[in-house]
Image (cartoon, helix red, strand yellow):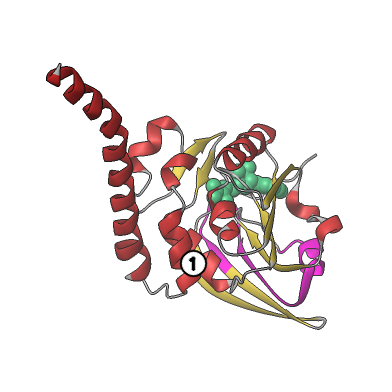
């Protein structure tokens, strides 16, 4: 009898062990990969601590979810390295109540991180299956402030514009003009710009009135920004 109870409680506690393990790994990830590299914004750090990155990667990748690198998510696409997600989040200066557009939903991880901080996230994915998967995953995880659409993000999302910030997670050869137009006055956009399959520059675009200020932040490698035919 006692053995049965023991086995039963062990069975009930087993998932807890795994959960704790992921929380520990995530904490370590934030300390070593994110804080140690200079990310300071408290809301960004809290979001990275909260969002369960292992829920956003394919089963075969779950063990690597908190490692310091991008991971494959199918269809030749990747979930970005945690530090890059944190960097792109911090640099747009996210605030509660803001409206943010993301181009390149992928797994939905960056969208979830943003949704922990801002009021509403609109995210566009060009690969239909990835968009659908991300939308289902985000609903299951309880995110009510994220809207996913399958489309070519080049045109932005006019119905919901202007945006406080735009985060582009695929490398474009130039900054799509419709995205610049859909930024609010005082808005910020972060986007990798450069040739596909080569090193690109992560660029910050700040809009003041009708003026745009552009600055290069760091070399990065992103999957290409595709165009629908
Ligand atoms: N932000 C994602 C990373 C995605 S990788 C995450 O957190 O997981 C970049 C994604 O951009 C890929 O899924 C790719 O299919 C998508 N993409 C590429 N070009 C696009 C376009 N023109 N419009 C929308 N999505 C695009």
Q: Local crowd at mark 1 within 10 Å, few (<14), some, or many (≥20)?
A: many
Q: Position of residue 125 (x, y in %)?
A: 68, 44
Whether label 1 lies within 8 Å of ligand 1 gets the answer no
Residue wearing tag 1: 44
As displayed, is residue 123 above or below residue 99?
Answer: above
Q: Does 51 sit above or below residue 46? A: above
Left or right: residue 98 compared with residue 217: right
Residue 106: in magenta span: no
Asked which quadrant contains residue 176, the reply is bottom right
Q: Which segment did they paint magenta?
A: 175-202
Where does the N terminus fall, quadrant-wise?
Answer: top left
Q: Is residue 181 magenta?
A: yes
Please indicate whether residue 78 sits to the left or right of residue 122 in the image. left
Residue at the location (82% across, 81% down)? 210
Please state which of residues 22 and 208 is positioned toward the viewer in this rendering: 22
Q: Is residue 223 visible?
A: no
Residue 13 placed where, x, y %?
27, 34
Question: Does residue 161 lie above or below 38 as drawn?
Answer: above
Residue, far front: 1
**Residue 99 visible in rendering:** yes
The picture places residue 30, in percent across and down from the top left corner, at 35, 61
Q: Nearer the viewer, residue 189 or 137?
A: 137
Secondary structure beneath dot 1 equals helix
Residue at the spot 49% in from the left edge and 41% down from the top edge: 56
Q: Residue furthest right?
A: 159
Q: Nearer the viewer, residue 119 or 123?
A: 119
Residue 219 x/y as whole percent: 49, 66
Q: Residue at x 60, y 48 (%)?
A: 143
**The quadrant where residue 200 appears:** bottom right
Residue at 27% across, 32% down:
14
Quarter the C terminus occupies: top right
Q: How many marks?
A: 1
């Amino acid at each position: 009898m006692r053995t049965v109870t023991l086995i039963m409680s062990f069975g009930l506690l087993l998932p807890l062990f795994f959960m704790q393990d992921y929380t520990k790994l995530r904490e370590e990830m934030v300390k070593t990969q994110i804080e140690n590299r200079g990310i300071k914004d408290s809301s960004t750090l809290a979001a990275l601590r909260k969002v369960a990155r292992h829920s956003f990667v394919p089963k075969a990748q779950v063990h690597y979810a908190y490692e310091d690198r991008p991971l494959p998510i199918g269809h030749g696409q990747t979930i970005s390295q945690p530090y890059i997600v944190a960097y792109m989040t911090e640099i747009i200066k996210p605030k509660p109540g803001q409206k943010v557009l993301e181009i390149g939903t992928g797994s939905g991880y960056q969208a979830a991180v943003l949704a922990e901080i801002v009021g509403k996230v609109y995210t566009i994915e060009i690969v239909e299956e990835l968009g659908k998967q991300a939308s289902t995953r985000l609903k299951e995880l309880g995110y009510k402030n994220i809207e996913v659409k399958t489309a070519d993000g080049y045109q932005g999302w006019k119905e919901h514009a202007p945006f406080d910030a735009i985060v582009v997670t695929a490398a474009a050869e130039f900054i799509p003009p419709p995205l610049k137009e859909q930024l609010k006055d005082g808005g910020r956009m972060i986007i990798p710009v450069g040739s596909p399959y080569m090193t690109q520059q992560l660029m910050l675009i700040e809009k003041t009135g009708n003026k745009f200020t552009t600055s290069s932040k760091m070399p990065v490698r992103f999957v290409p920004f595709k165009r629908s035919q």
